[in-house]
Amino acid sequence: MNRFTLLTGVLFVSLLADEVSLETIEVQKTAFDPSIQQLSEEEARKSYAVTLQERLERDVSFSAVTDNKGEMALSFRGLGFRATGYIEDDIPLYRSVNGFTDPKFIMTDATLEMNDGSTTGSLGVSPMGGEVLIYTHIPDRIHTASLYTTISNNDIYAYSSAGSRIDQFYIQADVGYYKQDSYHLSSDFTPTPLQPKGKRLNSDVLQKNLSLKAGIFIGDNTHIAAKIALKRSEFGIPPNVTIDPNHSLVWNDFSRISDKSLDSFYLYGDYNSENFTLTLRGYHDNYQDIYDIFQDQRYTVLAYPSLLYDDSRTGALVKGVFESETHHTTLTALYERNEHRRKGGSFENARYQADTLKLSALHQWNISDTWQLDGGVSYTQLSSKEASDGSALQPPEDKTAFDAQLKLTYTLSDDLLYGSIANKHRMPAMVEMFTFFPWTIPNPGLKPERSLQYTLGYQHDFKPHTYLDLSLYYYDIKDLIIKENQVHYINRESAIHYGAELRIHTKKIKNHKIQLAYAYAHTRDSLDNPLILIPEHQLTLEDTITLSPELEAFFAYRYHSSRFSPNSAENDLNTLYKLKSYNTVDLQLAYRLGKATQIRIGANNLLDSNYEWRYGYPSKGREYYFSLEWKLP
């Protein structure tokens, strides 16, 4: 049977169920959990965070790291960018061959939540690095529309959406456009033989997004929908500024990605009865990019012919939820196939495949008004094979993992206390097991990374003005997957990682909404080396000041302590550099023009701080912007 026919058939099985008279079902949100942080759309506007990555990296739980191609990625609590799950409306977002979900593509008005991993996840035991949960909006009236556009001294961004709901039918369209010719470095940046003062080399970006979703509510208990999302991008990967242009080429120093595309096709089915909910999802993604490596800093002479990556992913999900007055049970089955093909670049063509099966059972028991017990188990099997690439490797054996999680919550009046223990695994990505360039060494026998995680949390509501949230965690990691000397992924024996996060929200001062967040992280592997690019201390202080009913000011201060970075200029991952700590200050004024329109002016990195997010990679200097937001009243 054709795979798409099967997925479509599964989604419509729920239509055969008898209809009952219930309230309109809610398909967007999960029950709020004390371990979940909500990242509001309004907070993103205040901080000029137009992509999902920008919204997340402002949170003290996340740190900027690098992926395999030198692009910036995000690591949750230092667990690596591959350890965090990104879920949109119960569908895991596409991951590239290196296990990277690209959050720079996401530019919508969706609601965001962050699960820190101490509670069970939306699709089973939560991933090692927690989950980022994305809930897209469904129109609730005949006409909805919005427009948001921003112009800065570095870039231009525009986003618009329009939707309609008539009776039980709805349709929603979203369009995004982003263009950056380059970005300005801090005036304190010291020039190098490769990088002069002023604008960053090879830092141009062009992104275009389009999505269309349509659905229908049948009766009061059944919902079906379909969505198509088309994403296009091309950009330069800025080189390490410490490179000596007169020395021999390092493979990724002068590189660009062109014609990057991701086409996603989603199918949704939801059925609710009084004590039972059925969720069905089918999804398919096509991904391509052209990766060019150049011989010179002018990006005019190719070192190799253009290299084409051609990926696809197909998956299906079935989730059933059974509820009673004191018990809540969730059963989930997920199957996914990923195929990767490499073509060109003067290398032999290669094809790899990975099939993932995940079965999960979760249970929540409300023991009393004050005690709640949550638990879950998940079984994951990864079957991968190297179809061809000339290295004559035997296909790797199937990899299996058994995960379990237990959480106890105590609630009394204005206090909440919880403790969690979990055994979790991260399957190696295909790029970690197989070779994609002739100078890398494959390791198909790589073991899954595993972690025993302990979390203790406390929350208190100092009514009516202040709220405190404290979380302590300890991660004991075995078979840590690391990259050795740029050519080989290996399992390091172990690593420990412990830390604390504190969040305080207060309106104690009239007309002020203050948020203070602090994170401490201590990391060491079995060789007593720190995990790279993870700051030991992070601090953010934000204040939203209401100056009048129409005028609002926003202030944000951020501190990142020193971090350790490998010598990426010479591809020496065993030599660590200590990056200096840095501070940034952001300011914004927002003025509301009636019910529909709001304008914002602001500056990011107002102090023009000169800092690196990794060795040899300076960040943006001072940035000014103006934005206009309009929503249909």
Image: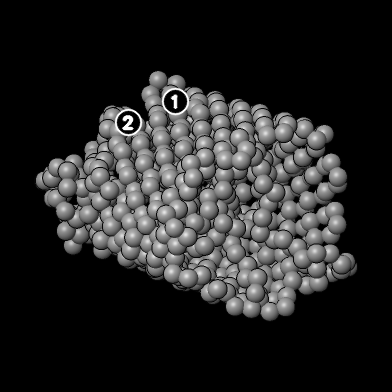
- State the residue in front, 346 or 582: 582
387 relative to 464, above or below: below
Q: Residue at x 71, y 45 (%)?
A: 359
601 relative to 362, above or below: below
The amino acid at mark 2 is: Ser
- The residue where tag 2 is placed is 562
The amino acid at mark 1 is: His
Would you call the spot at circle 1 few (<14 residues within 10 Å), some (14-19), or many (20 or more)?
A: some
Label of residue 522 in the image: 1
Q: Quadrant of the N terminus?
A: bottom right
Q: Residue at x 45, y 53 (%)?
A: 546
Left or right of 328, for residue 81: left
Measured from the top left, where is residue 281 in percent x and y?
67, 61
Measured from the top left, where is residue 262 in percent x and y?
47, 64
Q: Secondary structure at mark 2?
A: loop
Indicate the quadrant where residue 289 lies.
bottom left
